């Protein structure tokens, strides 16, 4: 349908008068991200509480001026009305051509605060003042054609994998009478791990003769094997601190297990608990095991993660727990 | 619901942001400024209120600055009660203009005591706006306009300071410039609304306290001595334009306002008299057309040259050729009126004849006897008038602004037979009594006589000092025994003041004051010439005064008295004919978005030019971008320079010069001066 095509065209490329006045090439910043290729998010404006109060006061002034046929009263009333309207335009203008890039975040546990850091970019030749992001982070000021680092904090209430679809930018600058808001699309995926709670002891070690590991990295047992240099990224738990104290370089004490005793955290071992409590308990075990540098595996109804002890392994387990869903 | 909740949370959060301390100081300054202007209205606003505000505000300001907790609730409540009681004691009613403004002033400083959040701050800011507004309920002169603009710029700067991010000091100049720019951008709106907002007739309601007089003026009761008090003021009363260029001579400039029919022997009253059917509303026809700009006097009477024959639509006409507004005049008003000196009734209605002959029962017997004596010696009315003239001229009557205190019970008898010093109302009142005693119907007329012609603005300025009272007598047969001269019929104006002090009528009060009535003969003539002349300084002063007065007059006629009629005239001069209120509102609704759009375009253009240094550098970047190298958004000038030099090795020198200078000016210790900016510009041009 031609009309629909035209509609979507306008939606994607809003016409603005500046397009004709400003050098396009110059506007398209170095990111290669064309300013106009992305549809500008609509700016919504509403009166703040102060704005409503001033409206009421202007109305009272108007009534008084009418009653006393007071032309200077009218003049002041209309002067303030003009001021209010200009502050409306300013507030809207203050949010125009702002963009958000490089949204970064770290996974957290449910119940903690999730922090997003991002770059607030100003693609216009005028500075932007007193911009707030989401509830109350800010104020940020961004000079013309520059960017600043901003951060928002969100309470992670539930575990799972989520998408932060938009970040809301708002401003009441300059007079605090109008609040302009726009939602900038970021589509940032983030993960919230289950809350690590639970009081149960670790499950008993499982005996797996056939899987007895003999490799050099088979750590986590009781028998001392030897010492090797520490490599960055490795757990600090097995550093030979006594040796460090004697002035030696950082080194790791190697142990080898009985070879057959394995630690498995199993979903089905926790039959008596509710789903979320099970996940929380498993999370806690995983964290404890990771902290002690033990090798462990995780068995969930839908998948099993084999025995390992690398940091990546822990993350993988935690992610599995975060996104776990019971399919009925 | 969830959304709503979220919104409210956000709202609360934003009001809990800390307030920069600079903003407090600024707010205090603005509050004192807007209250300070009310010092001009001291008689109406009690002194104690203006005095109490200062320590209260300073007390709370110091607490805020030292970050002490809020003043205890008991203190705040106690002070509020004290303030409310004080207002009720000072004014009998809590309603009205004066108590309202006083309460606003006091409560704003009380609000300062509980200032905690941004919302409180904004509330005080709005109170400041309203206090500035309140000023116009007293006075709407040009200095008030200047004050209003300055005060609004300053108060708005306080809001900008509040909303400006960070706690670092913001340059005052920046704030003032910004707030002026906001106001300037809104100015088209202000003008559009001012011109098009439909004006209304008169007030909707009257508040009890408002009936106190504004700036002085006549009362509907004239007691001997009252006009003299009024005449000591030089405040402007009315300004008259004669579009037909037919201004009468000075001695004929009698502006009538009130006709007093009734007396108790002491004071003269207008009394409750019914209004009349209106003859004409048209300003066309024979006669002297005047446009009168009247200063507010809080009463209803209107003035016009003797004697008006047509009157504006919003007036009522009363016996005695006077007309009155339908509402109390609280703001300056401009109206057109047509007068004919010979106008008047050719017959005397019986009821008016009774009013005009009514004498108080306890009249001084000497007055009665004198009147009777004149009557007995006369065969025509002219004889009576002649005898009266001789009496006033030959008995050593003195015209003076300070006649002294008359006998309280019989002031006019005391004046006529003992003191013989009086102002115009003494002469007019006693003459009217004598006429009535002689059987001639007489009434006292109050208004203004004379005025000063302003050659710059081509208008006549009448001040309160021109206040005057005179008499009118009925010279047509009232008594068959008195013959009537042919040429004089109807109500005849007789001004006894002119017999005693002809200079007052011919040259005005100022001159007659100068020569004082004590002089006589040649001395008097000499003094008159001296008073009329004046040295070069006096003339230069007069020249300046005339220009300034003319500016004030134009202000009054174009801006202050812009009412429903002037609005219609203005629109019809634009070719819109008669426009009703609804279409005016519609026009505002249509024009508002158009203006908003135009202002937004201006705003965007303005935004392009922020810091001249940055602007130059951005121009440099865009020049390079055109050449094919784009500065990345995160790229600093130095890194960009390295890349640019790699790409254009031939231009390396220029690029380096520009970058070096920019970096030093922007981040280094080099001060940004005009010369250096020019130098930068030159470098960029060489690229």
Image (spheres, rainbow, N blue to C red):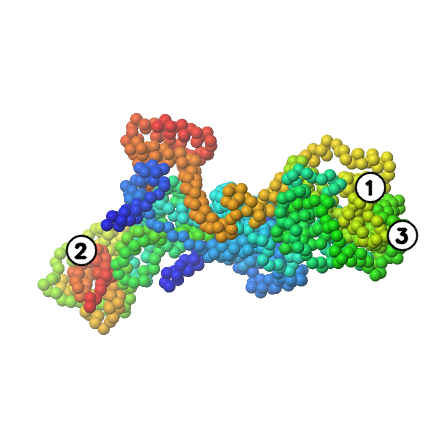
Residue drawn 24% across the image and 68% down it: A275
Q: Which mark is residue B299?
A: none
Residue denoted by label 1: B516
> How many residues crowd around disc 1 within 10 Å: few (fewer than 14), some, or many (20 or more)?
some
Question: How far from the left and from the top, in percent, is residue A314?
Answer: 22, 58
In this picture, residue B436 sits left or right of residue A45:
right
Viewer-closest of A165 and B570: B570
Among the two numbered marks 1 and 3 on one chain, the one whose residue lies closer to the N terminus: 3
Is residue B159 at all visible to an observer of this figure? no
In this picture, residue B434 sits left or right of residue B1:
right
- Asked if labels 1 and 3 share a chain, the reply is yes
Residue denoted by label 2: A226
In the rendered image, the vertical position of residue B94 relative to residue A84, given as above or below: below
Question: How far from the left and from the top, in percent, is residue B154?
Answer: 54, 46
Residue drawn 40% across the image and 52% down it: A45
Residue denoted by label 3: B376
> How many residues crowd around disc 3 within 10 Å: few (fewer than 14), some, or many (20 or more)?
few
Question: How far from the left and from the top, in percent, is residue A203?
Answer: 20, 68
């Amino acid at each position: 349908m031609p009309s629909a095509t035209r509609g979507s065209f306008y939606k994607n490329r809003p016409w603005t008068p500046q397009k004709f006045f400003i050098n396009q090439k110059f506007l398209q910043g170095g990111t290669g991200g064309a300013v106009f290729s992305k549809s500008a998010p609509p700016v919504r404006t509403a009166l703040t509480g102060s704005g409503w109060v001033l409206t009421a006061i202007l109305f009272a002034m108007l009534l008084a001026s009418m009653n006393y046929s007071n032309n200077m009263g009218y003049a002041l009333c209309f002067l303030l009305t003009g001021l209010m309207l200009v502050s409306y335009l300013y507030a809207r203008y203050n949010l125009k051509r702002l963009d958000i890039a490089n949204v970064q975040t770290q996974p957290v546990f449910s119940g903690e605060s999730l922090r997003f850091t991002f770059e607030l970019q100003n693609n216009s030749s005028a500075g932007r003042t007193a911009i707030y992001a989401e509830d109350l982070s800010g104020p940020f000021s961004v000079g013309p054609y520059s960017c600043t680092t901003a951060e928002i904090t969100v309470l992670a209430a539930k575990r799972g994998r989520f998408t932060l679809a938009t970040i809301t930018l708002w401003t009441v600058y300059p007079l605090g009478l109008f609040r302009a808001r726009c939602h900038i699309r970021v589509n940032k995926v983030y993960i919230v791990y289950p809350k690590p709670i639970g009081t149960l002891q670790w499950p008993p070690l499982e005996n797996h003769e056939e899987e007895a590991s003999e490799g050099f990295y088979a750590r986590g047992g009781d028998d001392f094997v030897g010492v090797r240099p520490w490599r960055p990224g490795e757990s600090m738990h097995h550093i030979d601190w006594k040796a460090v104290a004697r002035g030696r370089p950082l080194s790791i004490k190697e142990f080898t297990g009985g070879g057959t005793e394995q630690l498995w955290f199993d979903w089905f071992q926790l039959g008596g608990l509710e789903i979320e409590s099970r996940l929380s308990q498993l999370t806690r075990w995983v964290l404890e095991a990771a902290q002690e540098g033990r090798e462990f595996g995780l068995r969930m109804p839908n998948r099993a993660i084999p025995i390992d002890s690398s940091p990546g392994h822990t993350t993988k387990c935690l992610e599995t727990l975060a996104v776990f869903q019971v399919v009925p | 619901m969830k959304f709503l909740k979220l919104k409210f949370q956000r709202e609360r959060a934003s009001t809990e942001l800390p307030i920069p301390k600079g903003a407090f100081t600024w707010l205090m300054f603005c509050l004192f400024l807007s209250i300070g202007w009310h010092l001009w209205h001291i008689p109406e606003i009690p002194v104690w209120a203006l005095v109490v505000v200062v320590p209260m505000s300073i007390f709370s300001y110091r607490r805020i600055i030292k970050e002490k907790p809020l003043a205890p609730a008991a203190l705040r409540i106690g002070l509020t009660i004290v303030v409310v009681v004080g207002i009720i004691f000072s004014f009998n009613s809590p309603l009205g203009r004066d108590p309202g403004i006083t309460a606003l002033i006091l409560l704003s400083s009380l609000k300062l005591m509980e200032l905690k959040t941004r919302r409180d701050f904004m509330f005080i800011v709005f109170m400041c706006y309203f206090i500035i507004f309140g000023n116009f309920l007293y006075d709407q002169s040009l200095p008030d306009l200047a004050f209003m603009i300055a005060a609004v710029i300053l108060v708005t700067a306080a809001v900008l300071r509040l909303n400006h991010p960070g706690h670092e000091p913001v340059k005052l100049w920046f704030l003032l410039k910004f707030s002026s720019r906001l106001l300037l951008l809104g100015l088209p709106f202000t003008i559009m609304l001012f011109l098009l907002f439909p004006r209304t007739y008169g007030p909707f309601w009257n508040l009890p306290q408002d009936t106190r007089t504004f700036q002085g003026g006549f009362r509907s009761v004239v007691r001997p001595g009252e006009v003299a008090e009024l005449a000591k003021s030089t405040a402007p009363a009315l300004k008259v334009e004669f579009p037909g260029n037919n201004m009468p001579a000075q001695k004929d400039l009698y502006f009538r306002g009130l006709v007093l029919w009734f007396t108790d022997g002491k004071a003269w009253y207008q009394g409750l008299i019914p209004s009349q059917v209106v003859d004409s509303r048209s300003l066309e026809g024979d006669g002297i057309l005047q446009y009168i700009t009247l200063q507010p006097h809080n009463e209803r009477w209107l003035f016009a040259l003797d004697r008006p024959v047509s009157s504006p639509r919003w007036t009522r006409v009363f016996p005695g050729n006077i007309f009155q507004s339908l509402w109390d005049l609280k703001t300056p008003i401009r109206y057109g009126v047509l007068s004919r000196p010979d106008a008047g009734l050719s017959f005397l209605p019986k009821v008016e004849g009774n009013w005009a002959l009514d004498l108080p029962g306890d009249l001084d017997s000497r007055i009665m006897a004198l009147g009777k004596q004149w009557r007995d010696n006369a065969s025509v009315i002219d004889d009576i008038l002649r005898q009266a003239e001789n009496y006033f001229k030959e008995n050593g009557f003195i015209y003076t602004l300070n006649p002294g205190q008359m006998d309280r019970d019989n002031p006019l008898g005391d004046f006529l037979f003992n003191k013989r010093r009086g102002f115009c109302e003494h002469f007019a009142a006693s003459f009217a009594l004598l006429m009535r005693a002689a059987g001639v119907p007489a009434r006292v007329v109050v208004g203004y006589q004379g005025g000063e012609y302003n050659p710059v603005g081509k208008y006549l300025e009448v001040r309160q000092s021109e206040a005057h009272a005179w008499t009118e007598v009925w010279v047509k047969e009232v008594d068959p025994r008195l013959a009537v001269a042919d040429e004089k019929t109807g109500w005849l104006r007789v001004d006894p003041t002119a017999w005693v002090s002809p200079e007052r009528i011919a040259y005005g009060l100022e001159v007659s004051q100068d020569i004082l009535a004590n002089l006589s003969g040649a001395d008097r003539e000499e003094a008159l010439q001296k008073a009329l002349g004046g040295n070069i300084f006096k003339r230069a002063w007069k020249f300046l005064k005339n220009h300034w007065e003319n500016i004030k007059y134009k202000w009054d006629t174009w801006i202050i008295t812009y009412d429903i009629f002037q609005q219609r005239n203005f629109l019809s001069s634009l070719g819109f004919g008669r426009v009703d209120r609804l279409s005016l509102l519609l026009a505002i609704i249509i024009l508002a978005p158009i203006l908003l759009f135009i202002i937004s375009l201006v705003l965007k253009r303005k935004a392009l030019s922020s810091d001249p240094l940055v602007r130059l550098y951005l121009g440099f970047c865009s020049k390079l971008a055109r050449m094919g190298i784009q500065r990345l958004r995160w790229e600093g000038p130095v890194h960009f320079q390295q890349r640019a030099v790699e790409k254009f090795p031939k231009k390396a020198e220029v690029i380096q010069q520009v970058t070096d200078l920019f970096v030093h000016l922007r981040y280094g210790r080099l001060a940004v001066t005009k010369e250096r900016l020019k130098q930068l510009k030159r470098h960029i041009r060489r690229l």
